[in-house]
Amino acid sequence: MGSTLFVDKSRDRLRPAINLFLKDHRRLTDYAWGAGALAYLYRQLGAATRAGSKGLCGCLTLLQAWIYEYFPLFRPSQLPQSPDAPRASSWISPCLPGGDEARQRLARYRQLLDELSADDVTWTPYGRDGHTDIPRSLYTGPIRFSDIAEGYDPSLCLRQFGYRQIIPRAMTVPHDQYRPASGSSYIVFWDPWVNQLWDNVAARRLDLDFASRPCKQPSEIVEEYVDWFLTRSHPRITHPTDGEPQPRPQLVHQVSYDFLLLFQI
């Protein structure tokens, strides 16, 4: 729990809130530990983006395995294994250098990310019909772990289900947040009613066929998507050395689109 799923900067100690889930060992299989680890990782990724933050917590094994699945350019060697074995266990962890060689490797990775094209991404590493085996993967709304709740919306990444990427609908957002530059005391406040969304899967499940249509090509998008995306994300990791500075990305919920109402659940 403390060294893999819910890692913080204490290394292997448990947050007090986790102990509440461990009091009755007979109920351990009743909890969605995968969703909890994902919510916790999302919160830690948010804290790590603060200017004064140092390091990254959360289930980094999950993050690392996700990178290997989707981005072949960064994959290490892989071992053959049984289909029933955990997918992450097949990757052979590389021995990474330190010092100047590590800094050169980091610069190279940043360059590769800036030059990344749609053809460099494996959009459906789990197959085009993975969501039919795991219906909850199409859940939309906050996912929670203890006092942490983070937004989850599959309409942001329709291509991983084999569907054309559209401009996502308006997301459910927190009513308030406190995100200091240092990353400490990173808090997001949700309305109490969001606590019931996870238990209402049928009403909170994205209808893929209503929202979009299957891709003819793995990276297919609607024509307006790139313009929408560039106003909300930095297109490059490396800082530009000349030319006009990049505009500050806008938060998704700061801009409304009338036609997004069509995709509200």
Image: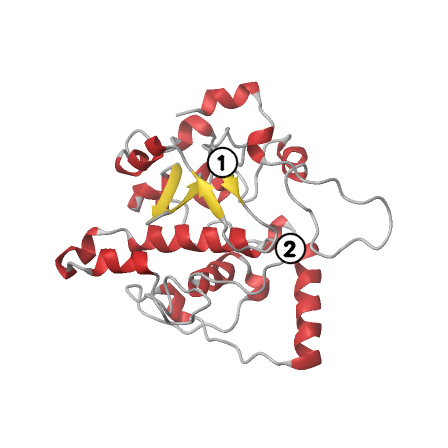
Query: Hey, which quadrant is residue 149 in on the image?
Result: top left
Residue 71 on image: x %, y %: 55, 59
Amino acid tagged 1: Asp
Judge from the rendering whether residue 215 lies leftward or rightward of residue 37; answer left or right.
right
Judge from the rendering whether residue 14 lies leftward or rightward of residue 153; answer left or right.
left
Residue 105 visible at all? yes
Residue shown at 30% from the left, 67% from the top = 85
Local secondary structure at mark 2: loop
Which residue is at the far right?
242
Q: Quadrant of the C terminus?
A: top left
Judge from the rendering whether residue 30 lies leftward or rightward of residue 58; answer left or right.
left
Q: Nearer the viewer, residue 139 or 141?
A: 141
Residue 126 visible at all? no
Q: Quadrant of the N terminus?
A: bottom left
Image vertical order of residue 36 relative to residue 231, above or below: below
Image mark for residue 176: 1
Residue 125 on image: x %, y %: 45, 54
Image vertical order of residue 39 relative to residue 87, above or below: above
Residue shown at 41% from the left, 54% from the top = 40
Image mark for residue 51: 2
Residue 70 on image: x %, y %: 51, 56
Residue 214 on image: x %, y %: 46, 35
Query: Hey, which quadrant is residue 140 in on the image?
Result: top left
